[in-house]
Image (cartoon, rainbow, N blue to C red):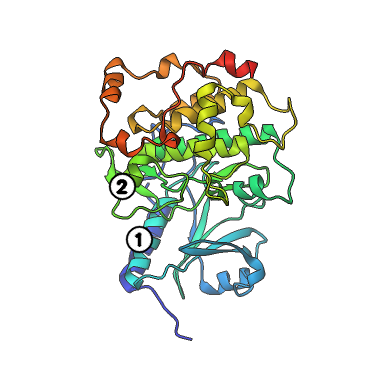
Amino acid sequence: MRRLFPKKGVIKRLLTIARRRNGEEEEGLPGNGVSLPPDGHSPEKPTWRCFSYEEILHSTRGFHQDNLVGRGGYAEVYRGILQDGREIAVKRLTRASPEGQKQKDFLVELGTVAHVCHPNVSTLVGCCIDCGLYLVFQFSSHGSLSSLLHDERAHPPPWELRYKIAVGVAAGLRYLHEGCRRRIIHRDIKASNVLLTADFTPQISDFGLASWLPSQWTHRTAAAIEGTPGYLAPEYFTRGVVDEKTDVFAFGVLLLEILSGKKPVDGAHRSLLSWARPLLREGATAELVDSRLADGSYDKDQLYRLAFASSLCIRARAARRPSMSEVLDLLAGGEASLERWKPPAEEDDEEEDGDEEDELWELDEHEDCDSPVFSLSSAASS
């Protein structure tokens, strides 16, 4: 079998990255002025190393099918055990593309995940560039949030765990948007890309579609629309516009998924947004709760905050969505007032006149939930 190796130029670039991580601080690593994670501890510099192919092969038992834990459009993920006993997840790039493009995709993802370090973001252990391209992460023993919510053989997660996961993902996204020197837009926030550690700490994973966003740029435009149906923001789906609010919209859908236990698009192609928006407008938050949870098993104030945050995040106009700092503040007990988030009068006038974006997204699943009925009192009484 022919053994494929990356070009020498690629290897040189990778080794340069490795040397930098052992010396001076690389641009993109957490530094002064970084927002602290919720526990108050400063993010530490990430540490990772280059593995040999033999180490990767041995840890996964030759990429045995029994160790295959995930497969996507661009990669396969295998569980492995290193000689020191540590469990790892080996991501093997399988994208059918010219070798040069595959190397570019690999370097882009490595250049992103190598510079992040936060409790709610997957930790890079290392990489391998021998006989293919591989990224090595810490293994998440409880799988993905998608499995936790939708596995019919498992017990539904309790309310306390759902809220913990929602807050943790919000903290991870805030770090990516505001805690790194370079803003990172994930572009594929969804339940299957949230992994759960041994103590069910949520970690954002899979940076295959992630983009750097320079500080002087308001957004970037994607040539190809990639992502997962049900999570795509209107401006991204129609015009390819990518910025922090792209992730905010997807997070709003994820909150509804955590609340309801429903998939963004079910087997009958029914939209979670279409189902949830009327309930959000009416303030019927109790009806959003997963039917598998017993009555009274959830905290009403937390339920309201999750529902209110999701209604803000899924607004059709990106400018009217909150930042992840504002979302995290809301989930942590900050002011949850509809008046605070009411659009300016001039924006109301613009909406009455209508514009191209509203015409494109006039379907009810993309309407805003700004009804005055949606208030704390109505939520608590429902």
Q: Position of residue 331 (x, y in %)?
A: 54, 26
Residues under numbered marks 2 and 1 in contact, where contact means CB atoms less than 8 Å apart: no
x and y, in percent, of residue 358 in the image: 32, 33
Q: Can residue 169 be seen in this view?
A: no
Amino acid of disc 2: Gly
Image location of residue 236, percent across then percent down: 34, 44
Is label 1 in a helix, a strand or a loop? helix
Q: Mark 1 points at which residue?
A: 16
Which of labels 2 and 1 is toward the front?
2
User: Which mark is on residue 371?
Assistant: none
Q: Disc 2 designates what residue?
A: 240
Residue 157 at least partly seen:
yes
**For the point 74% across and 27% down, which residue is it?**
295
Question: Residue shown at 53%/45% (left/top)?
Answer: 270
| Label 2 or label 1, whichever comes before in sequence order | 1
Query: How many angstroms separate mark 2 from mark 1 (CA)?
Result: 33 Å
| Residue 303: % across, % down | 61, 26
Q: Residue at x 47, y 45 (%)?
A: 230
The type of residue carrying mark 1 is Thr
| Residue 377 image-quadrant placement | top right
Relative to 157, is 138 on the left or the right?
left
